[in-house]
Every structure is written in structure tokens, then in C-alpha cells.
Amino acid sequence: MHTHVGQTWNKGAPLTAEALLRWMDAHDIAQAVVLPLISPESSSYPLTPDFVLAQTAPHRDRLIPFCSIDPRTSYRGGHKGLVEMLSIYQDAGAKGFGEHKPGVAIDDPRNMAIYAACGEVGLPLLFHLDNQRNTDKPGLPGLEKAIAAHPDCTFIGHGPGWWASISADATQAEMGGYPKGKTAAGGAIDRLMEKYPNIYGDVSAGSGANSVSRDIEFGREFLIRRADRLMFGTDFLAPGQPVPQFDLYDRLDLPADVQEKFFRANARRILGLG
């Protein structure tokens, strides 16, 4: 549910679409979502939707492109103009919106305009949340406001602030990192998933792996309990990058029906891949 191609950070080598496909073959991955990164807080180099659409074009059976617009972008025509912009990307093959990673609050009015447009055109939105991008407070009140106000938008959570919120005792500082120790039941993620049908989770990157492995018994139970709302991801973006998810999920020995939903079916369903 979460990869990138190109030069993401100023340290490390760029990842080509062909190298991504070879890595996927080596790990038995049939398809992968490829995300642009356009906000200045999101990466060292911008990875535009046009770049992602071009790089994935020869491989659309396996590489699924998303699009993105920074909420601070100037555009004309209000909501209608924003919908028209997204529709152009959608017509070019984009199946979702993200990685949404701007340096504003998660419920900033400019973000809310993005959510409304994504809901109208039917593009699921994958957001990154921490103490710098799409910021929020412990308990995720801003995110809840956004989810409740946009029931037609499918939200997919990712990042340290989102995954720290698996625990009911998450602090503001922990929302910017990888907290350790036992997970306290009743966290914001469970609460939001119980209350709203339009919020999902992308269990990628160090933050996603940490949320499961910090308390392995709770993490396994969480994956089973929320099997209809969670999706496998890696955030693979550079050659040779370590990916903790593979060993972690081998250790968990999840039930077969949970594996089917988590590794494939949920993503295919919400992205309309058949």
C-alpha cells in the first residue's frame, strides 16, 4: 500500500520502477501503490504526480499510481476547480490521493477542501501524521473532525503520530517518534475505527512496524480485530532499504482469512482493483 520511486531524500540512491519491480518479485509482492511526494516537508526532492504516472505507465498491472496536491497550492474555481484538477489525474490512471504530507494541521481548512474533493471524485486519501506534517493532538481530535465531516472520503492513516495513537496513553512527544513499552487499550485508532467506517490504516514504515512489535501480543490481536481496516505497506523507497515488516508478519502467524484481507483484499477493494 505504500512505496515511492525516484530520488526521495538527498542521501541514498534513487529507486527506479524496474528496481522496485525486481524487489517486489523477490518478496512475492504482486502489486504496489506508488505515491508522489510534493509538499516541501515531505522529502528532499519533489516526486510529482506526473512523474509517478509516467514511471508507472508501462507497469499498470503491478504499479498503482496515486496523485497529490498540496493544500497550500493556488487554484481557481474553489471546490469545482479542485475537483477538476483531481479528475485530470484520475483520468490519467491515479487510483488514490497521497502521500498527503503537508506541514499544516490535519483539520486545517485547506486540508478540509482536499478531503471534500477526494470524497466527491472517489479517491481514497493516504495521509502522514506526525508533529510536523498534518499535525494533531493526542487522541486525534483534529482527525476525528475531518473524518466526521467527510464521510464520503476514505482516509488511510500512516506515520508516527497516527501509529503512536494505537495506545490510549500516547503523548504529544510520542506522536513524533516510535514509542516503546506496553500498548494501553482504548487508543484513538481503535476508537475511530469503531465509530467511523471511512478510516483505514497503512501498517508501513518503522512507525507501522513499531506499533505492532512494541507489544507483540496486543499488536497481533489488533491486526485480527481490525482485519477489515488494515493494509500491508512498507514505505520502500531506496535500494537496499531494510524492511522490518517481512520478518514481523512471518513471526505473527496470522490466520489465513486475516492475511487475505490484510495483504491483498482490503487494498484491492478500496482502490477498485476488482
Image: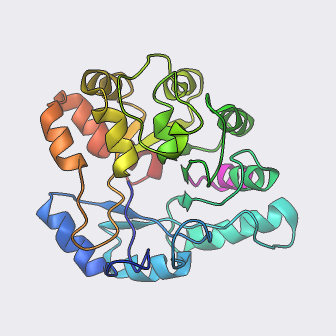
In the image, taking residue 83 as reference, residue 87 lies left or right, namely left
Residue lying at the far right in this picture: please name it.
Answer: 77
In the image, taking residue 220 as reference, residue 100 lies left or right, namely right
Q: Residue at x 57, y 26 (%)?
A: 192
In the image, taking residue 97 as reference, residue 220 lies left or right, namely left
The answer to whether residue 125 shows anywhere in this view is no
The answer to whether residue 31 shows anywhere in this view is yes
Q: From the viewer's side, name the closer residue of 174 and 158.
A: 174
Q: Quadrant of residue 73?
A: bottom right
Q: Residue at x 86, y 63 (%)?
A: 78
Q: From the viewer's side, name the closer residue of 117 and 162.
A: 162
Q: Which residues are magenta?
A: 116-126
Q: Provide residue 139's location: percent of width, then percent of height.
A: 61, 28
Which quadrant: the N terminus?
bottom left
Q: Provide residue 263's location: percent of width, then percent of height.
A: 27, 44
Q: Residue at x 48, y 48 (%)?
A: 159
